[in-house]
């Protein structure tokens, strides 16, 4: 696929990524693009839209911390202490800004899916759930029984999968004595509540 239905040129995005992102991360991005499209098809969403969000999700991954903070502040994003102590967490929100500025993306659902791919967000839509899960569960992340179980859950229940992926991430962060962004806790609680209500 050389161009998306929105008129965005895939080779142009790939060319930009080659200038700004190391090759191993591009391989990850391409796996996210593929998995997002596959998950979208499983959940009756537009695979091309999910693939595009996947391709754009890590545009700012390798921006310097100062640039991430400056762009987030300029966009008046709601920043807290964890954002300032862990600026790399801003790369998702800033990637959405770059998608707007560099590639003219205006679709709020696409931009939301890019912005939400790391920490999630309470009340995020199915497209955001798909990209969040594809980023966490693409094949390059590993081949453990736990990951394979999460991949199976993602095929049938987006909210349960988001909840379980958040649990896994939070468990890892606690064991590593690392900061936890409050937005991930809110995402986890929201996804768990959605699952219990279904």
Image (tube, rainbow, N blue to C red):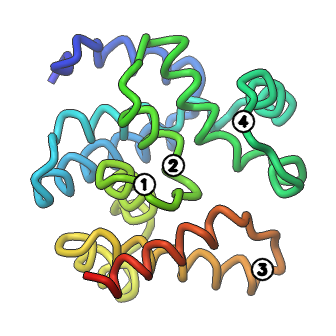
- For residue 51, which quarter of the picture? top left
Tell me which label, 4 or 2, sits earlier in the chain: 4
Residue 17, percent from left and from top? 49, 23
Viewer-nearest of discs 3 and 4? 4
Q: Rounded to the nearest whole Å, what is the CA distance between mark 3 and mark 1?
A: 28 Å
Label for residue 116? Answer: 2
Which numbered disc, 1 or 2, marks the residue that appears first in the sequence? Answer: 2
Q: Which mark is residue 124?
A: 1
Tag nearer the camera, 4 or 2: 4
- Residue 176 bears which disc, if any? 3
Residue closer to the observer: 116 or 9: 116
User: Tags 1 and 2 in contact by the CB under 8 Å rule?
Assistant: yes
**Which mark's residue is nearer the viewer, 3 or 2?**
2
Q: Position of residue 111 (x, y in %)?
A: 45, 32
> Reading the chain from its start, which is encountered first: label 3 or label 4?
4
Q: Tell me: residue 62, above or below residue 101.
A: below
| Residue at the disc numbered 4 | 77
- The residue positioned 58% from the left and 24% from the top of the image is 97
Q: Nearer the viewer, residue 145 or 163?
A: 163
Q: Residue at x 53, y 57 (%)?
A: 121
């Amino acid at each position: 696929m050389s161009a998306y239905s929105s008129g965005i040129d895939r080779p142009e995005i790939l060319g930009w990524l080659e200038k700004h992102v190391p090759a191993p991360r591009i391989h990850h991005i391409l796996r996210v693009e593929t998995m997002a499209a596959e998950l979208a098809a499983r959940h009756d969403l537009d695979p091309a839209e999910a693939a595009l969000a996947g391709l754009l999700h890590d545009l700012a991954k390798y921006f310097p911390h100062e640039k991430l903070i400056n762009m987030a502040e300029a966009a008046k994003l709601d920043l807290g202490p964890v954002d300032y102590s862990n600026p790399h967490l801003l790369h998702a929100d800033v990637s959405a800004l770059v998608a707007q500025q560099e590639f003219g993306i205006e679709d709020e659902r696409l931009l939301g899916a890019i912005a939400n791919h790391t920490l999630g967000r309470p009340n995020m839509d199915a497209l955001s759930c798909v990209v969040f899960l594809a980023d966490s569960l693409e094949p390059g992340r590993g081949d453990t029984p736990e990951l394979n179980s999460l991949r199976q859950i993602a095929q049938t229940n987006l909210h349960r999968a988001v909840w379980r992926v958040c649990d896994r991430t939070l468990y890892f962060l606690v064991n590593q004595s690392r900061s936890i962004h409050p937005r991930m806790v809110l995402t986890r609680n929201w996804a768990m509540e959605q699952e219990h209500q279904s």
